[in-house]
Each structure stands twice: as C-alpha cells, then as structure tokens.
Image (spheres, rainbow, N blue to C red):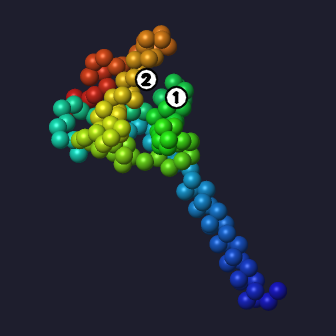
C-alpha cells in the first residue's frame, strides 16, 4: 500500500471510530442526580421549587423511568428507557391545560402526589409526602 492509500485508510478508520464514539455518547443520557422542579413561566408561583432526586427514586425506591417519563400515542405510553427525555414544559404549558394535556403544575402534582399517596395507603411507605405543601416545596 502506498503512502497516500495508507493515509486515507488511517483517516477512514479514525473517522469510523469517532462516529461510533459520538453515537454511543449521544444515545446515553445520564440523568442529573438532583433537580429542582420549578418554572419561571407560571403566572403565579406561590410555592417554592420541589427538589427531586433521580437516584432515590430509581435505585432506592425502584421507580421505573417510564412511570414519570412519557410519550403517549393512541392512549399508551410508548416512551422507553433510552429514548430522548424532553423537559416537562415542552408539552405541559405552565399556565393552561391544552386538551388532555394538563398544565405543568397539575401534571407534577398528579404524577408525584398520586404515586406518593398510593404508596402511603398501601403501607409500602410511611414517609412519601403528599398532604402538606411544605413536605415537598421549599420555602421561597
């Protein structure tokens, strides 16, 4: 193989390696360990943010990712682990319901409080807060 051919061969190999590495890292999404559920877009924001921990929910409480993350088609959640994760506000307007899509604060409350209430009522958890606002919301 001549020098020019060898250089082209090496360039192609490096290109394939970089493309493969880019594909692998683009598909993997590391969730933040902790995040604040809050929005500056609310008309009124009477309560402080809620701190949510992925680690506790996923590992300690064994909550499946698709119990919170969703994409509905024909009434079924078709979101699977590894699919892109959109910000909640991408679909849930902070200030108004849009058809069957609840506004952001209602979506958060329905998802979080319903799960916590079910855990408490079933006896699976004694400390899943759902009654008092200040159990989840930080002071402003």
In front of the other: 28 or 84? 84
Q: Which mark is residue 115?
A: 2
Q: Residues within 10 Å of mark 2 (few under 14, many from 20)?
A: some
Q: Are marks 2 and 1 in contact (CB under 8 Å)?
A: yes
Relative image position of residue 70 (x, y in whole percent)? 47, 40
In front of the other: 130 or 12? 130
Relative image position of residue 36 (x, y in whole percent)? 34, 38
In front of the other: 76 or 127? 76
Image quarter in which the C terminus is found = top left
Question: Which residue corresponds to mark 1?
Answer: 63
Q: Is residue 89 above or below residue 121?
A: below
Q: Is residue 135 above or below residue 24?
A: above
Left or right: 105 in relation to 32: left
In front of the other: 127 or 75? 75
Asked if residue 31 shows in the view, the reply is: no
Asked if residue 129 shows in the view, the reply is: yes
Q: Residue at x 26, y 22 (%)?
A: 134
């Amino acid at each position: 193989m001549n020098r020019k051919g060898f250089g082209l061969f090496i360039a192609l190999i490096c290109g394939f390696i970089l493309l493969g590495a880019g594909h692998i890292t683009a598909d993997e999404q590391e969730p933040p360990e902790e995040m604040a559920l809050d929005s500056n877009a609310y008309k009124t924001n009477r309560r402080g943010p809620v701190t949510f921990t992925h680690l506790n929910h996923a590992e300690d409480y064994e909550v499946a990712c698709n119990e919170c993350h969703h994409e509905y088609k024909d009434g079924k959640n078709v979101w699977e682990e590894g699919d892109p994760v959109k910000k909640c506000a991408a679909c849930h307007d902070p200030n108004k319901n849009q058809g069957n899509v609840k506004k952001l604060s209602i979506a958060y409350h329905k998802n979080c409080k319903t799960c916590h209430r079910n855990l408490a009522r079933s006896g699976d958890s004694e400390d899943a807060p759902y009654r008092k606002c200040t159990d989840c919301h930080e002071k402003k």
